[in-house]
């Protein structure tokens, strides 16, 4: 390279178009979440359901082992195995905690420190920004739902010695966690965009989640009508699981209603999120 005198020279480089302009947001966000206090404790709790079901799958292939009888009975069919895993209470709760842990401050922090100008002054669009934030929450949710589901399929094949998982169950085990993760990601990011106060975001998210279950339980108990359970986020997740895995519904109502509710709410959350970011940008 020739040595030049001081002065201004025409830049002779070239711009390269990137289709993953949000990748730096994703990488930095993954690292930031991993470095948070008590992250290892939360990740251990989130991995716990997988090891419970891994043990149950192993025991189900060994009739001589009389352990975990109730759970083993539930997973005699492949569809019931993955439905029980994905709608397992501790797994759903851990996904709620992961959503809060990974996503509560993703946008509220940018609101607090007025970072939107810094982000969008670069060759990033509003949708690149949203995709970057979504990818962070999705990474952790899928890491503890979709990946364990795939590992359970592999474990079942190894323990049984044959590929006995029906194709529709295999596809359902991939599709279900993705849709639920998209729903929870849009939910927490929408709430995160409402305030620059992280604690307020956590409280609102928890209140909305718990309130939906409480209201559903109260109305169902008063009016003795299972349709009121559609007010519950957790019940909709389980009912949607019944639809995807083609098993008996969690409660006496059409399963397709839960699918519409979850998809509509996801679209609604993304719309609110987009509007909030547009206002913050302006």
Image (cartoon, rainbow, N blue to C red):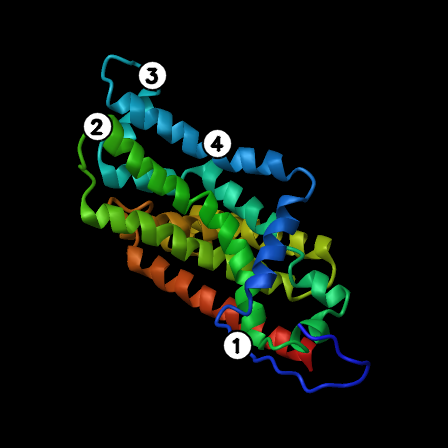
**Which tag, 1 or 3, sits closer to the chain's start?**
1
Would you say the residues marked 1 and 3 are in contact, meaning their CB atoms lie under 8 Å apart?
no
Helix, strand or loop at mark 2 = helix
Disc 1 versus disc 3: distance between alpha carbons? 59 Å
Q: Is residue 218 visible?
A: no
Disc 3 versus disc 4: distance between alpha carbons? 18 Å
Observer-nearest residue: 108 or 74?
Answer: 108
Single out the mark in the foreground, 1 or 2. 1
Mark 4, residues whose alpha carbon is within 10 Å: few (<14), some, or many (≥20)?
some
Disc 3 versus disc 2: distance between alpha carbons? 18 Å
Identify residue for label 3.
Answer: 67
Disc 1 versus disc 2: distance between alpha carbons? 50 Å
Helix, strand or loop at mark 1 = loop
Identify the mark at residue 203; answer none if there is no mark.
none
Res. 195 image quadrant: bottom right
- Residue that lies at the very extreme toward the front in this rendered image: 2
């Amino acid at each position: 390279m020739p040595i030049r005198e001081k002065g201004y020279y025409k830049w002779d480089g070239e711009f390269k178009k990137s289709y993953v302009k949000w990748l730096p947001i994703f990488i930095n966000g993954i690292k930031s979440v991993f470095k948070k206090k008590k992250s290892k404790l939360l990740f251990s709790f989130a991995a716990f359901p997988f090891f419970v079901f891994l043990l149950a799958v192993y025991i189900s292939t060994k009739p001589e082992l009389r352990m975990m009888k109730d759970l083993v009975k539930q997973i005699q069919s492949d569809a019931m195995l993955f439905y029980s895993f994905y709608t397992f209470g501790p797994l759903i709760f851990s996904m709620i905690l992961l959503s809060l842990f990974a996503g509560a401050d993703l946008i509220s922090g940018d609101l607090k420190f007025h970072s939107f100008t810094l982000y969008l002054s670069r060759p990033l669009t509003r949708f690149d920004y949203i995709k970057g934030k979504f990818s962070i929450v999705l990474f952790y949710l899928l890491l503890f739902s979709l990946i364990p589901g795939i590992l359970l399929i592999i474990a079942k094949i190894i323990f049984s010695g044959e590929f006995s998982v029906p194709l529709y169950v295999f596809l359902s085990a991939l599709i279900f966690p993705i849709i639920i993760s998209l729903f929870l990601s849009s939910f927490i990011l929408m709430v995160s965009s409402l305030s620059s106060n992280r604690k307020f975001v956590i409280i609102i998210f928890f209140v909305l989640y718990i309130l939906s279950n409480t209201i559903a339980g109260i109305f169902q108990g008063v009016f003795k009508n299972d349709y009121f359970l559609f007010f519950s986020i957790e019940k909709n997740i389980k009912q949607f699981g019944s639809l995807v895995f083609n098993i008996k519904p969690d409660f006496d109502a059409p399963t397709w209603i839960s699918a519409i509710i979850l998809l509509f709410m996801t679209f609604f959350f993304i719309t609110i999120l987009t509007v909030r970011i547009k206002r913050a940008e302006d």
